[in-house]
Image (tube, rainbow, N blue to C red):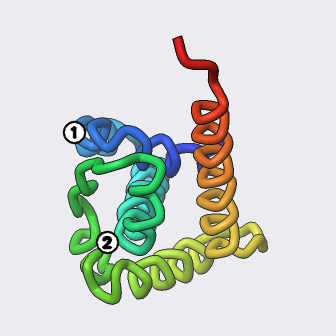
Amino acid sequence: MRLAIVPLLLRHPEISESVPDLAARLDEVASLDLQTLYMAAVYLQRNWRSRLSIYLHETPLLPDLFSHQVGLPPPDERFGKTGLIELADAWQARSQFPFERLQAIINTFELFVGQLKQEKATQSNAPMM
């Protein structure tokens, strides 16, 4: 359920304005989880910007709010790929659960793109009024 934050941010980057205040009000663990998911969206957006633009047109880039704070590479390094890998590794290392974090992020993104494709197909097939 938490991973749903990633596509939400990709679809509505304006939400990023409230993320720092929300992170500051959460306990340490929840705040780090929010920062992790936020940065996953930032890295994915940079890595897949051209693909996302097919479905979302020109949306503003999510600002880099936490990479320096949590010791991750800047989002523009290798179009976000380096940061995404390091983020997933750090998230995996601090978790007690064995699921593969990078694959979970990628799967979430692919499901989101699938939804966007379906929405575009539905709009294209809608009758003109």
Residue at figure coordinates x 47%, y 57% from the top left: 37
Using the numbered discs, state the Cα–Cα distance from disc 2 to disc 1 in whole angstroms.
19 Å
Q: Amino acid at mark 2?
A: Val
Residue at figure coordinates x 55%, y 18% from the top left: 128
Q: Quadrant of the N terminus?
A: top right
Residue 77 locus on image (x, y percent): 28, 86
Residue at figure coordinates x 55%, y 72% from the top left: 91
Viewer-nearest residue: 8 or 124: 124
In the displayed orientation, state which residue is furthest to the front.
128
Residue position for label 2: 70
* Residue 107 seen from this side: yes
For disc 1, the neighbor class at 10 Å (few under 14, some 14 to 19, many from 20) is few
Q: Amino acid at mark 1?
A: Glu
In the displayed orientation, state which residue is furthest to the right.
98
Residue at figure coordinates x 29%, y 83% from the top left: 73
Nearest to N terminus: mark 2 or mark 1: 1
* Residue 32 seen from this side: no
Image mark count: 2
Residue 30 locus on image (x, y percent): 48, 48
| Left or right of 73 on screen, residue 40 | right
Please tell me whether mark 2 or mark 1 is closer to you in this view: 1
Residue 17 locus on image (x, y percent): 22, 39
Q: What kind of element bears circle 1? A: helix
Residue position for label 1: 17
Disc number at residue 4? none
